[in-house]
Image: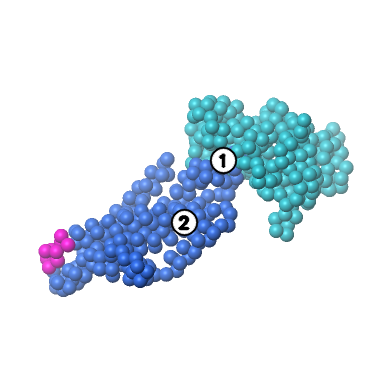
Amino acid sequence: MAKAIRSRNLHKRFGDLHVLKGIDLEVEEGEVISVIGPSGSGKSTLARCLCKLEDIDEGEVYLYGNRIDDKRISNRELSGMVGMIFQQFNLFPHLTALQNVTLAPTKVKGLTREQSEEVGVRLLHRVGLGDKLNARPSQLSGGQQQRVAIARALAMEPKIMLFDEPTSALDPELVGEVLEVIAQLAHSGMTMIIITHEMLFAKDVSSRVIFMDEGIIVEEGPPYEIFVRPKQARTQLFLQRLLPHFGKTLVVE
Amino acid sequence: MLDFSAVLPYLHMFGVGTLITIRASIVAVLLGLAIGVVVGALRVLPFASPLRMLAAAYVYVIRGTPLLIQLFFIYFGLPSLGLNLPAFTSGVIGLGINSGGYVAEIVRGGIEAVPKGQWEAAKVLGLSYLQTMRYIILPQAIRNMLPAFGNEFVTLVKESSLLSTLAITELTMVGQQVRSVTYASFETFALVGLIYLLLTSVTSNALSWIEKRWQVR
């Protein structure tokens, strides 16, 4: 069985800026991976390369054995494999919550209106927005918008979900409701990569944590190993700087 | 002293001139929209191509030369190439081609003002370029474009007065004719100005109405 995600020697440059310097990544089906690391370490770029939002400069990316970093794969084929959640939600502001969810199933998968609405209503209920079907994005809080975005991505039934700092643009009191939905999804067996600064969440929800810095994977392992006994000096430094008190309680634990 | 009764016997002429101005404006607006939407869409093609360069050249030439010269070129210049167009046709085509260059820039600006994240979200959901354009980008872009369209159409109505230089008896031409008969210059052009004001007010109010409706949808 092919790995859900495999990248080999993945390089990405923006002009002179070498953002990803040879990423080798293998993700099994059902794994939930958190990617942590300082800003500018290439985490987001990695996620964007895995769903073809960025063309890569070198290396290979496979989803379920299909090479996706060349021209042959269409948006349509890709959408059945991988869904993406953005930091800024990127909901379609001129459509209602339900229309946001049903558009792609209708236009890309060819579902009838009734079928796609059934899917949309079910998914919006699942993310706790059954009463907001006809609300516009502008009438929703950030947390609600992000949950609509999750429902919208799920409507295409991707096998893999990527989360690019899903709670970074949210007010602190709205972070919980979004993390809850993501955690539910993680427990349902979905293959996921979550780029996050929510360390507690990453520790609780993921099966593996990857620490990235300056375009490389510095260290990876089970959450406990990374958060409690990081081997690399760079990982230790990052965690200490980010979570001085959190790090100590973890060590005591 | 001012004597508006001097122009009263010629009111029907103003009526005819106004109708010609309206007709020329409507046809030119439609022509300009058709050209502008196509050229504007070519301008935002995601890959470099001869079509995109052609569209850029079109906008460059149209915006860089006076409308009057463009009209003269079509009406007086093209016959040298064996293309003889009637005055009204020449005028409307000239106005439309000119407006198309400006509409293209409005279209391009409206499309480019839609955040990049909208394209990205649509792409990951599997929508094709054309589907993204149609269902995601254009509905938002048109909202961005409407105020600028209002400006452009009002400008076009006013610039249609240049058609008088091609001896088309639109409103401005009628004004000149009436003035040369009555010598009531002030009264004549005050009336002509008033009629233009009426036409531009109707145009911009119509656009505002459409703009509001589009916001609600």
Is tag 1's residue or tag 2's residue first in the polypeptide sequence? 2
- Looking at the image, which residue sits at the far front? B82
The residue beneath circle 2 is B39
Magenta-span inclusion, residue A215: no
Q: Nearer the viewer, residue A108 or B176?
A: A108
Q: In this view, does A160 lie to the left or right of B78?
A: right
The correct choice, above or below, for A85 with respect to B189 in the image is above
Looking at the picture, how far across and down is residue B87, in whole percent? 28, 65
**Magenta segment:** B5-13
Q: In this view, does B150 lie to the left or right of A218?
A: left
Which tint is chain B?
A: blue
Looking at the picture, how far across and down is residue A87, in whole percent? 64, 43
Magenta-span inclusion, residue B6: yes
The residue depicted at 83 percent of the width and 43 percent of the height is: A219
The residue beneath circle 1 is B127
Tell me if mark 2 has few (under 14), some (14-19) or many (20+) residues whose alpha carbon lies within 10 angstroms of its own: many
Chain (cyan)? A
User: Magenta span: helix, strand or loop, mainly?
Assistant: helix
Q: Which of A192 and A28 is in front in this view?
A: A28
